[in-house]
Image (cartoon, rainbow, N blue to C red):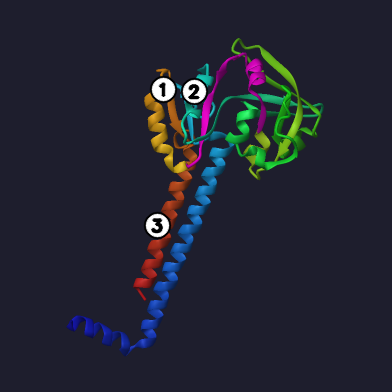
Amino acid sequence: MTLWVLAFRNVLRNARRSLLAAGAVAVGLTAVMFGQSLLRSFQRQMVDKATGVMLGHAQVQAKGAKDRKVPETLLSRPERFTELMRRDPRVKAAGARLLYTGLVYSATASRGVLVAGVEPENERELSIIPGYLTEGRYFGGGERDAVMGAKLARELDVRIGERIVVMAQRPGGEMQSELFRVAGLYHTASVTYDGQIVYVPLAMAQRIRGKEGQASHVAARLKDGDSLEAFAGELGAVLSDPGAVVLTYKDVGSEVVGIKKFQDAILVVIMLVIYAIVGLG
């Protein structure tokens, strides 16, 4: 009791100093809470964008692939994994994709790109790209429709309805190309997404690459990302193919996890500095 009385008297003895100290603590805590909230919001947006454009929350891939982003080992009969994912009530959408590097060229220019073969009917729910569309449509039902970023379209000098050619190397070494028409253009403000990816129907991507009936991965988008770990664990337990593996976006997009860890470390340093300033008065 005596200790509390002494402390109270000390506070009253120099009210101005006490108010300044209390104000410093309040401002410091407010700044930390605001910064933490802002950082968490930014991180959630970063994850939502990464998973919504290409990664998905979870993927089924073939085992043994060295590059998990663009796996060279492909899945056979990917539709069985798509159906397995769709049966889970936690899944909002699922679909197969075939990814590989290729060349796209117009009448005036050419660029190296990532060719993304997708299932348009599934991709509308699986991907956030349709929401970034600025011109045209996200596939119109034609097997030769192509969707690309507005930046890439400017570099190729093509517009909606104009023709492009997509070319890639087949397993035997020969080059194969197919003609497409630009159906839609999108803008995400990301140089990578807007300038380096061409989306085409999955069947056409398989034909170009000579990989009919195969896919790089089957991706799932969950209704609630917080259920990811439980979903991935349960899905892995029921996979009937020993040559397939379940991965989360953290496994495939390791740079996203790295950025989050770096930002968290910066936040800890800032908190320590603020606490030190407050502690020293």
- In the picture, the disc for residue 268 is 3
Q: Position of residue 180 (x, y in %)?
A: 75, 24
| Of marks 1 and 3, the one in the foreground | 1
Residue at disc 1, secondary structure: loop
Marks 1 and 3, the one that precedes in the sequence: 1
Residue 224's spot in the image, x, y percent? Answer: 48, 42
Three-letter code, disc 3:
Val
**In the image, 222: left or right of 281?**
right
Question: Can you tell which mark lies on residue 239?
Answer: 1
Q: What residue is shown at x 47% (from left), y 34% (from top)?
A: 89
Q: Residues within 10 Å of mark 2 (few under 14, many from 20)?
A: many
Instruction: Pinpoint residue 186: horizontal percent, then vertical percent.
Output: 70, 39
**Disc nearer the start of the sequence (2/1):** 2
Could you say which quadrant of the image residue 151 lies in? top right
Report crowding for label 1: few under 14, some 14 to 19, many 20 or more residues within 10 A (C-alpha). Answer: some
Which residue is disc 2 drawn over? Answer: 81
Q: Amino acid at mark 1?
A: Leu
Of residues 56 and 15, which is closer to you in this image?
A: 56
Q: In the rendered structure, which segment of residues is drawn in magenta?
A: 197-224
Extreme residue in the bottom direction: 13
Residue 114 appears in the figure: no
For the C terminus, give its image quadrant. bottom left
Q: Residue at x 75, y 26 (%)?
A: 105
In the displayed structure image, the side of residue 207 where residue 274 appears, left or right: left
The amino acid pointed to by label 2 is: Phe
Query: Badges 2 and 1: C-beta atoms under 8 Å apart?
Result: yes
